[in-house]
Image (cartoon, coloured by chain):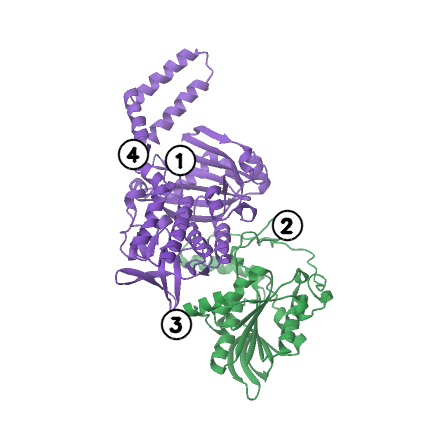
Amino acid sequence: MAEEKFDVIVVGAGPAGTAAALTAAKAGLDVVVVERGDYPGAKNVMGGVLYADMMSSLIPEFWKNAPLERRIIEQRYFLVHGESAVSIGYRNPQYANDPPNNFTVLRAKFDKWFAEQAEAAGAFIITETVARELIRENGKVIGIRTDREEGDLYADVVIIADGVNSLLAKQAGFHPEWKPDQVALAVKEIIALPKEVIEDRFNIESGQGVTYEFFGQVTNGMVGNAFVYTNNESLSVGLGVMLADLVKSGLHPYDLLDEFKSHPMVAALLKGGETKEYMAHLIPEGGVDAMPPLYGNGFMICGDAAQMVNALTREGSNMAMESGRIAGEVAKLAKDRNDFSVNTLSEYQRRLEKSFVLQDLHQFRNTTKYLEHNQHFLSLYPELADMALHEFFLVDGASKREKIRRIMDRVKQKRSLWRIGRDFYGLYKNMK
Amino acid sequence: MHAVVLIKQVPDTTEVRIDPKTNTMIRAGVPSILNPYDANAVEEAVRWRERLGGKVTVITMGPPQAKEALRKCLSFGADRAILLTDRAFAGADTLATSYALATTIQKIMETEPVDLVFCGRQAIDGDTGQVGPGVARRLGFEQLTYVIKVDEIDPEKGEIQVRRVVEDGIEVVRTKLPALLTVEKEINEVRYATMPDLLRAARQEIEVWTKDTIGADPNQCGLKGSPTVVSKSFVPSPPDRHLQLFEGDVAAQAAALAEKLSHLDVFAGRLG
C-alpha cells in the first residue's frame, strides 16, 4: 500500500486532541487521530468538572446530546482545620438552565462521545495505537511512527496532544522529564451511591449537582486540595498535591485520600458508598515556565502536553479544548496558505496569547510557587479562621467587643498583623 | 472459500457489577467490546482465507453502535461487514437470534455460496453457547463446537477436519462442508492489526441490513419470537466457610489436619 498522507495527524484523543481534530475536520481537512487507549476516554482522568462555554464554541447546544452527569448549581469551598471548617459557597439553581455553566462528567463516557463528534465530522480515529516518535526530515516534522506494523503515518502538520506524559514531546527533546515541582499528583475514586441518596445528601434535584473543594489540613498543609463532586449515581472524590511536596512529606497519596475520606465532614457525605474505580494521574502545574516550545516546523503542542493547566483554579480541560481548537484553525490556515513552517504555525502562539489560555497562565505564573514558599496559607490561616469563627459563634456571655479583642489577641500571638498584611499583599501581587 | 463469521458486541463483563436489589446487570457506563471468542473466530477465518483465498464476511445483530465491533473485525482482515439492526430484533433470545442470523446467511447464499460459518464458543455476557448451534441447525450445516484446531480444509473434496474439546479429551472430527464451527480461545492468537488494515477498516462502508432486507418473519423476531422467560435471577450467597488454625510442629499439624478431614463429609468414601 502506498504511504498514507493526511493533512493533519492528531496524537491523543483527550479534550485537546479531539477539539483539534473536530475543528480541522469540520474545516474540510483530512484528519487522523491516534489514541493509545482501547477507546477515547479509556485512559483519560480529571477531577470531573467541564465548562460549557468552551464546549459550546466547539459544538453548539452540545448539552442536548452529550453524556453529562449533573449541572453544577452550587460551588462550595471549605477551609479545614481539625474537625471544623470555614466554608463559603454560592448556590443558584438557575445554573441548571440551558446553557449550563459547568457540569460533571465521567471521562470514559464523555470523551468517547466527544470523539464520535470528531468522527462524524470526518476524522479517522485509530485506537489502541501508540505514537512512538516523530518522523522528521530537513528540520521539519513530517509524520509519526506508531507501534503498529507498517505503522508510519505522514501529514503536513502533527498536532501533539498526548497528555502530561507526552511521549512525543519528550522524545523529540522539546522538554526534559518534568521536575517534581512542575507536576501535581492527583488520586481519585469514583464512589457509587444511589441517585436519591446523592440528591438528599447534597440537597439537589435530579440533574443538579454540586462541587465541594477542600483546602487546609486535608493536604497536611501541602499545596493542593481535595474535592467531592456529584455525578448522577456516584461521587468523584479526590485529592491532588504537588509532587515535590509529596516526596518531601514521605506520605502516600492514597493514605492522604483515605484520611480525607475518613474526615467526619467527608465521611458523612460518602457513607454507604462503594468504591467503583480508583485512579491516579499527574497534573502539569509548571505553568508558562515549564512550557515546551508550542510550535515548530510541521507541529503544534496542545493541552497537558504543553503544561496548559491553571493550577490555582484547577482548569485544564478548557485550556486543552481552547488550545486544540486554535491548533485546528491554524492547521486550516496553513493548508490554505500551503505553508506548514513556523511562518504560519507561529500564528498558534499569537492566538493563544490573545486567548485566556496564555493570559491566565502568565497572570498566575508565580502564585503556586508563592504558596509553596508560604505554606502557612494552607496551615496557619485555616487554623486562625477556625479559632476566630469558633470564638465569634460561641455564646459565652462575653460582649461582642470583648470577643473581637480576644480574637485579635490570639491572632497576634500566632503572627503579627504586619506579617499577615505582607502575606496577603504578596499573594495579591502574585495573582495580579 | 467463503466464510461468514457471526460476532457480537458485549459489555466488558470484567467491569460489570450486579445490582444487589434487582439482581440484574448494571450496564450503564460499561464499555462495549468485541466478544473475545469472536475475535478468535474472525482470526481463524482470515487465516484460512489467507491460505486458500476467498472471502470473509462478518455479521452482527445489534444496535447501531455495534458497528465499532464490526470495524474491529475489518481491521483483522475481514472483507465485508454487515450490521443487522432493526427495532423488530430487540429483546431476542437465542432462538430468535439464531433465526435472524440464519435468515441473513440464507439471504447471502442467494447470491454467493457460503462454505463455512465461524462463531465464538459463547458470548461472555449470556454464556449460553446456543446461537451457533441454532444457526447450524436452521441452515442444515454440520456443526463443530468447541474447536481448538482446524487441521485441514479441503475445498476440492469439500471436507474439513477439526479437533474439538470434549469432557475427557479431544475429539478429531472430519466432516463435509458447509459446516459451522464454534471456536475456543486457544485456537489462535488474535493479531495486532497493521496500520494499513486499520485505515482500510476505518474507511470501509459497513452495510446496514434490516428485517426487510432479509425478509424475516416478524413473528419469529425479537421479543415476539423469544419463548425464553427469566423467572428469577439471583446472586448466589457465598458458601459458609470456617477457618481453623492448627498449632504445633509440621507433623502435629498434619496429623490434626488428617484427623479433621477424616470426619468431614466431603471425603466420605474416598479416605481409607
Q: Are marks 2 and 3 on the same chain?
A: no
Say the numbered circle drawn on residue B22: 2
**Residue A284 visible in image:** no
Chain of the residue displaying label 1: A
Determine whether the residue tagged by mark 1 lies in a helix, strand or loop.
helix
Label 1 close to label 2 by CB (< 8 Å): no
The number of discs equals: 4
Question: Colour in which chain B is shown?
Answer: green
Which tag is nearer the camera, tag 1 or tag 4? 4
- Where residue B2 appears, x then y in whole percent? 56, 79
Marks 3 and 4 belong to one chain? yes
Q: Work out how far the residue at label 2 is from the one at label 3, CA to CA, in angstroms.
A: 55 Å
Label 1 and label 4: CA atoms lie apart by: 19 Å
Q: Is residue A210 above or below residue A394?
A: below
Label 4 sits on what residue type?
Answer: Tyr
Letter of the chain that mark 3 sits on in the rendering: A
Give the image location of residue A8, x and y in percent: 39, 59
Neighbor class of circle 1 (other Cα within 10 Å; few <14, some 14-19, many 20+) is many
Chain A: drawing colour: purple
For the residues labelled 2 and 4, the Cα–Cα distance comes to 53 Å
Provide the residue designation for mark 1: A218
Which amino acid does the dot numbered 3 rest on?
Ala
* Residue type at tag 1: Val
